[in-house]
Amino acid sequence: MSEAPTTHLEGALQEAAQTLSAFVADGEQMAAVLRFAQAAEATLRRGGTLLSCGNGGSMCDAMHFAEEWTGRFRGDRAAQPAIAFSDPARLSCAANDLGYEEVFAREVQAFGKEGDLLLAISTSGQSPNVLRACEEARERGLVVVGLLGNGGGQMLSKVDIPIVVPVATTSDRIQEMHIKIIHMTIELVERQMFPENYA
């Protein structure tokens, strides 16, 4: 194998490491992750539901977020209520009848209630359907957390807790941080609610 692939591999890993280092060094973003964990814990303790949405890779992250709660993370514990807006029948129905911008807002209308939390994921911070979900969620009294990139975009002012990946400008690097933030948040909540899993 030529040197070029190895060089590209090292470059990609160095870029990912720089993005992670920049995030760790950003006190505002680290504090926002703690606020996210506190909000998620409070939601679960009062019997609320964790909701999540995003497009493409961000939908995969939204699904990952939900399944970690309903399944298991580090060890056995009670299933926690979480729903990702990813059902193709519901999404295509809403898109056909109401337009694609409304697909996630419609899910918020169906499932969201005051005291729940919505995790809204967008690497650009500009996704129209995620923006609409944020607006609908805030109107209904949900706490809205944004996992964002590229400065946060329009969503920066549409969420209660914005978490913006610094430095990175491409969706792959941003999404890599998003899944780390999801895992960190779940661990922080579990350490409080299920400390026996970390003994």
Image (tube, rainbow, N blue to C red):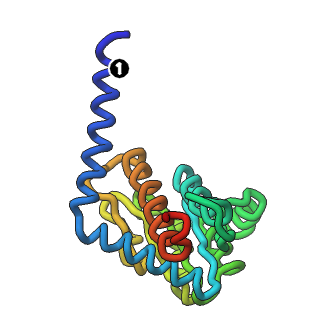
Q: Is residue 44 left or right of residue 173?
A: right
- The structure residue drawn at horizontal position 33% and vertical position 59%, both measured from the top left corner, is 165
Task: Count residues near mark 1 (Cα–Cα under 10 Å), then give few for <14, some for 14-19, many for 20+.
Answer: few
- Judged from this view, the residue extending furthest toward the front is 199
- Residue 57, position in %: x, y? 53, 50
95 or 89: nearer the viewer: 89
Identify the image quadrant of residue 103: bottom right
In the foreground, 138 or 187: 187
**Which is more toward the observer, 177 or 168?**
177
Q: Quadrant of the N terminus?
A: top left
The relative height of residue 4 versus residue 172 in the rendered view (above or below) is above
**Residue 98 drawn at (x, y percent):** 69, 70
Q: Residue at x 72, y 67 (%)?
A: 94
Instruction: Determine if residue 11 is in view.
Output: yes
Circle 1: element type? helix
Asked whether residue 103 appears in the rendered view, the answer is no
**Residue at 43% across, 77% down:** 159
Q: As displayed, is residue 35 above or below residue 176?
A: below
Q: Residue 27, how many percent across, how many down?
A: 23, 69
Quarter assignment of residue 164: bottom left
| Residue behind mark 1 | 5
Q: 51 or 91: nearer the eye?
A: 51
Asked if residue 141 is positioned above or below residue 25 in the image, the reply reads below
List x then y, in percent, for residue 86. 67, 60
Q: Quadrant of residue 148?
A: bottom left
Tally the marks.
Answer: 1
Left-right relation of 27 to 62: left
Q: What amino acid is labelled 1 in the image? A: Pro
Is 180 rendered above or below residue 49? Answer: above
Q: Residue at x 32, y 43 (%)?
A: 16
